[in-house]
Amino acid sequence: MKQKTGKKGFHMPHVFIILLAIMLFIVVLSYIIPSGMYERFEDAAGITVIDPDTFSYVENENPITFMDYFEAIYTGFVNGATIMGTLFISSGMIYLLEVSGAFGAGISAILKKTKGKEFSVVCIFYTVFVIFGVLGYGEAAYPFYPLAVTIGFALGYDRMVGAGLAIVGSTVGFTSGLMNTFTTGVAQQIVGLPLFSGIGFRAAGLAVFYVIGLAGLYAYCRKIKKNPGLSLMKDEYINQKAENQAADGEKMTVRKALGLLVFLGIIVAQGYGCIRLGWSFPQIAAIYVIMGILLAVIFQFGPSEACQLFCKGAVRVFAAAFAVGLAQSVVVLMNQACIMDTIVHGMAQLLENKSAILALLIIFLFVTLFNFLVVSGSGKAVIVMPILQPLGKILNINQQVLVLTYQYGDGITNSFWPGSAAIQLSMCGVDYGSWLKFCWKIYLGFIVSAFVLVMIAYGIGYGPF
């Protein structure tokens, strides 16, 4: 009997393995890059920033040991508890609405009115996620990612389309920085600019990124509609198409319509609370608990039944929540290694005596690469912007241009580098290797256009106001 002999192709490792490898990479760096530190102080706005003139190499009194590597996982989970808890709570409560059939009925109603124009629905939901990004939702938008995948399936596309409209849309909005408190807001405060000043040029950048992202989605949607075999999730997609053809659409009822209205109200409340009231994860989690109670009453779920359904919904985001913990573990090791300030200091020295255009290119590339190690946009701003501010004055670069360069360098790769993309992809059930095949051209377009926009901003004297 002949045995099958075939070459096994390379498969991207699981996101947990990738994050553990990044943690190991930090450990290795800690023994290569010398520890260094800037002194920190609290500015007039109450933000803790570094003093760019106080860098010194230090002896790391707490080097990373064998056990520290593994203990960092636990500490990362503790540090990421607020995000993880919000993911579990919101996903569990949203599952009550899914089980009720309200989402299915709503999608069926949309499909009846857009028959033959499925991509128009993709555009609508892509725009919704762009708005989420503009408002700086970040992790707060994660619970909606599985819903985007469901919408992609219902429209006759594969899982990647749903993941793409959610992740690319959020990236476009977040990168634009129109009303992003976590990156643009913090960076502008540090360098002394009025909050969200220069919004007109950033709106033009948003339009550019919006078109690039939508064009990438359109090209993929058109390709797999013509030939399902070209889908990056081919086997699942072919099975899903067969199921869609056999399934009947959900019927809309008064209860389902009321449930959807409650859900819409929660989204509006979340947006208003985050922008106007300074809400964070505790408040977001609280309103989803309220939503769950209202849904249980509307759909007449018994208390025990509602709890069981909640648990099923929460379990779906276990992988994503675990990835949040591991991503925080990377930060734990970075802080223990005391090498972040050393890296930033090295970049500052590299920029000395460089032309303005070359300096902007180095800054853009540095922030883009630094995003691989430090995911937090506000965290990077606190470390990087106090260094860039005096350098900008020396090189005659407007502070607004520096903030724009930082914003673009931080935002684009938030869903490309594995440390941050892993969490988002887990929410969508997409592996990292397939995601890279889908998005690399789109993100290359983002990066090239971003630097062109930075050059235009510098050329027109995109001023401090």
Image: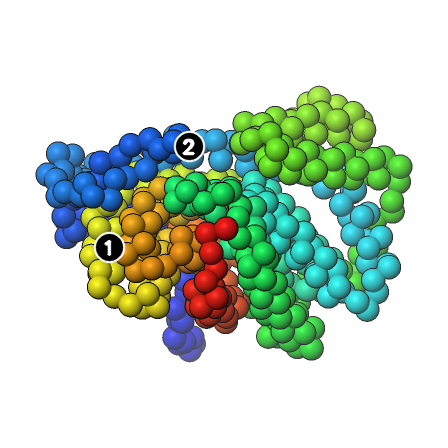
Residue 36 in the image: above or below residue 230: above
Residue 224, x across and y down, in percent: 65, 73
| Rendered residue at 56%/52% (across/down) | 199
348 or 163, which is in the foreground? 348
Element type at mark 2: loop
Label of residue 45 in the image: 2
| Rendered residue at 45%/45% (across/down) | 193
**Which of disc 1 and disc 2 is earlier in sequence?**
2
Three-letter amino acid code at the position of disc 2:
Ala
Q: Which quadrant is the N terminus positioned in?
A: bottom left
Element type at mark 1: helix
Label of residue 316 in the image: none
Q: Is residue 144 visible?
A: yes
Label of residue 348 in the image: 1
Q: Is residue 20 visible?
A: no
Circle 1 Cα neighbour tier, 10 Å, few/some/many (<14 / 14–19 / ≥20): some
Q: Residue furthest top?
A: 303
66 or 126, which is in the foreground? 126
Q: Which quarter of the figure has residue 116?
A: bottom right
